[in-house]
Image (cartoon, rainbow, N blue to C red):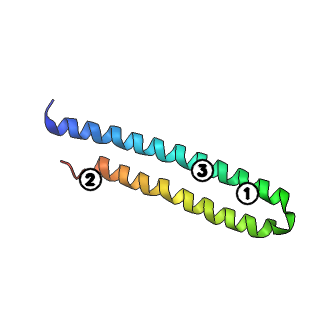
Amino acid sequence: MDGRTLIIQASVYAAAIICFGAAIGAALGNANMTGKGLESMARQPEMADKLFTNMLVAVGLVESMPILCYVIAVVLVFANPFI
């Protein structure tokens, strides 16, 4: 195998690891945040509307990170800067 093949192979593996890590991190972050949000809404029902809105904004911010990771993975696979 030549150097180009090894770079492409390593880039595909790196993209897979990036996507896996981003998906796991976002899933755990969203699960923890949603659980704590529901717990706080149960404790203070009068603040439920405000807490729910803040929780949705925070979930959207957590979901933006995996999207950026997926873009980096696509760049590594299709527009590889290392070749």
Residue 35 in percent (x, y) is at 72, 50
**Which mark, residue 7?**
none
Which circle's residue, 2 or 3, is located before the other in the chain?
3
Quarter placement of the N terminus: top left
Image coords of residue 80 (percent x, y): 25, 50
- Residue 79's tag is 2
Give the secondary structure at mark 3: helix
Q: Which residue is mark 1?
A: 37
- In this view, the residue in front, 70 or 33, is 33
Residue depicted at x 42% and y 52%: 70
Q: Quadrant of residue 48?
A: bottom right
Numbered disc in front, either 1 or 2: 1
Position of residue 65 relative to residue 4, above or below, is below
Helix, strand or loop at label 2? It is loop
Q: Name the residue: 55% across, 50% down.
A: 26
Q: Which residue is mark 3?
A: 29
Residue 18 location (% of width, % of height): 41, 45
Task: Quote the CA–CA distance across marks 1 and 2.
Answer: 40 Å
* Residue type (three-letter) at the residue carrying disc 2: Ala
Q: The residue tagged with tag 1: helix, strand or loop? A: helix
> In the depicted view, which residue is nearer to us: 74 or 34?
34
Query: Is 67 situated left or right of 44 in this image?
Result: left
